[in-house]
Amino acid sequence: MNSQLKAVTLFCIVTSVSIFLDIQVVRQILGFCFLSFVPGYLLLRLLKLTGKNTIETIIFSIGLSISYLMFTGLLLNQIYVTLDFPGLLSTPSLFVVFGSVFVLLALCHFTESEKQTSLGFSEKFVSTASSILVLCFLPIIGIAGAVYHSSLLTIVMILGIAALFVLSVTWRRTAIQKVFPLLILSASLALLFNTILVSKYFLGTDVFSEFHVYRTVAINGFWLPSGPMSSYNPIDSLNSLLSITILPAIYTNVTGIGADVLFKIFYPFVFSLVPLALYRMYEQQMDKKSALLSVFFFVSISIAFFGFEPLSLNRQIVGQFFLIMLILILSDPQLVFGKKQVLLIVFGAAVIVSHYSMAYILLVYLALFYVFSRIKIFPFRKASMQSLYLGTIVLMAVLTFSWYVYVSGSPLSQLGQSISHITRFLVTDFGDLGARGLSQGALQPLSPFAATTFLGSINKGLVYIENLFIAIGIFALIVKPDEFNLHSGYRLVALLSGIFLLLGFTVPNLASTLNMTRFYAILIPFLAPFIMLGCTFTLRFIQKSLSRYHIRLRHFSVRTISLCIITFVLTASFLFQTGFIGHITNGYPYSYSLDLARRESSSDISIRIDTHSSYFLDEEVLSATWLQEHLEPSAKVYSDPNAYLSVLISYAHLPYDRSLDIGRSFAPSAGTYVYLKYMNVRMGLVYLRGGDLINVSDLQPGLERCGKIYSNGDSELWYSP
């Protein structure tokens, strides 16, 4: 028996014992590792794809594990619903999940020889990694800084990440390159958990609705699709996604981890693998230091990686993870064609059931990739043709539209409405920046027309420089495709991504239908290397132009200068994006982990409103859970939209049809409740649908006719008799 399979077998046995005996802590840790890695690793061994590369072995194993759990859970769910058996959270489910994994383990034992070895790790890599275990302290410092609200620890984490990236690029010893993946993973985990753990509750917006659909599955014991429909409903759309319904149900059942804790741990863990997958993709196209800087650029973008918005989109996290692995497979020249198609189909199906918007984007990518790679005048034809089969695209299209017709028609209805809106207002909204989402939300400070401070102007200038280099790199790819030594498959993906992003900036209502920041976050990973390539191309052009006048300029190393410039720009931008500069200069408090106290006590009311629209207090959650316990059957609840779409929909599990918006002419019906959160009680302000604000005093005399039934100082509940 192969030594690695022996180790996996022993691990499976120990994990099974810890789970069925319910050994606390051990069950949670081993169960999480078992589900996240073992099924996929066994499938990878059956495909004879282990040992190729360490990073690919890790991310493909985790990707296949997540896919396996979603589809196995779907199959179990349909059997349970059909035969009226106990649901996904029952003991029989545990036996089925473990039994299926042991079947895979047995197949691996019978189908491979003793000589099959290697998980992809080399002894040299392990010894090098162990010599700089200091990297492992980055996530610990980041977590401690968030949990204890320690600005000092968060500052140490930020400066440590910046210093390690700079040191890795400037150090001339090639041995340091072997720990680049560990640096990327450690920095990613530190940044993500430093944000997500600043509160013990959920942060942002969409995660609350995602948790609502999961709790529906947990309460029912099984998942029920919404079925065909002709209208859009946000909850029905979310309910169609296995990534936030069946997947967390299996994890909570097997590991015994609380659902709210699982949401705050599992999805950031998956997201931390995205930079690792990107590094693998980039290092196949360029040198390792340039690849590292490209990853540094991605993890430095708060609206794409470690900010509240991307971390509150768990469905997008899972979908983006699978999408990036698909692009990695398409651009990998070493994968065997047949096995490449298998992985494309599995990960493509996982994208479809993980995120509807990502499924549509994937179809567009695949279709255009196939068409452009077969145009004779296109310079990337030969290698691209070896990456994709027409039948794979057809299968992906059939799966996508079948899923979103029969499981839930809401996402397709939303797609139809979006296309209709774009075409209808194409001409009338062409000059409106708001129609592109460029001056709203997280992108508002970067608008050319937004007022800003001196430091804000520097931050804005750095972002403009980064994206200017990317634009130059894409332009060079078009006009001089032989300038960069890129795999033709990746060239085509990058070109398509650049076109999509350009269309998002120019076509009204295209990117804003998804949300411009989310659109940017999905596309920018495929364009990140061009920040380095664009800078290199610019310097080469300058060198060629001036060397005719100054011969000495020919001897300067363009690559070295490019590395220095990009390292400086990215480091400075990272310090701005993480809020470090704002914190030490007492400027705008961007960071919650650094400046939560300053945000809550700010004299700028807009900062306090923004804070308490995304960050929620114990008292708000306690009042929501109290409401769930005491709410009369079928009774409806008045609240502002922000309160409903956060604590009420998740912690009170209040259905859509039992929520009522507080309006300007507030007149509560008999038998209804009124929920007031911190912003309503302490700040005296109420959000209205559409974004307008009114004073709580404007709710009179309607509120006077109600009686206060609960108060904890920061949140209140009223009842209209």
Image (spheres, rainbow, N blue to C red):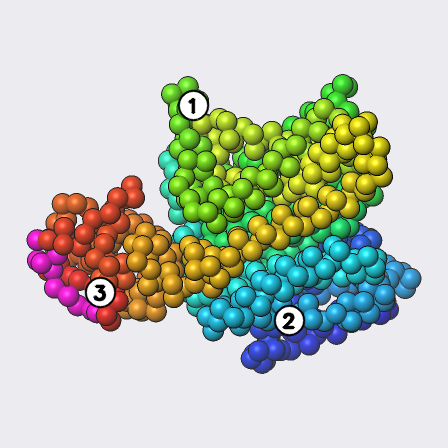
- The answer to whether one can see residue 267 in this image is no
On screen, residue 316 above or below 630: above
Apparent side of residue 256 relative to residue 434 in the rendered image (left or right): right
Q: Name the residue under label 3.
A: 716
Point out which mark residue 430 bears: 1
Apparent side of residue 228 relative to residue 695 in the rendered image (left or right): right
Res 153 quadrant in image:
bottom right
Q: For the residue marked with disc 1, what is the amino acid?
A: Phe
Residue displayed at 64% across by 56% down: 273
In front: label 2 or label 3: 2
Q: Residues within 10 Å of mark 1 (few under 14, many from 20)?
A: some
Magenta stretch bounds: 701-711
Residue 706 falls within the magenta-colored stretch: yes
Task: Please state the horizontal and vertical placement of residue 203, each as a whole percent of the image.
Answer: 43, 58
Q: Name the residue under label 2.
A: 137
- The answer to whether one can see residue 13 in this image is yes
Q: How far apart are marks 2 and 3 (CA)?
A: 42 Å
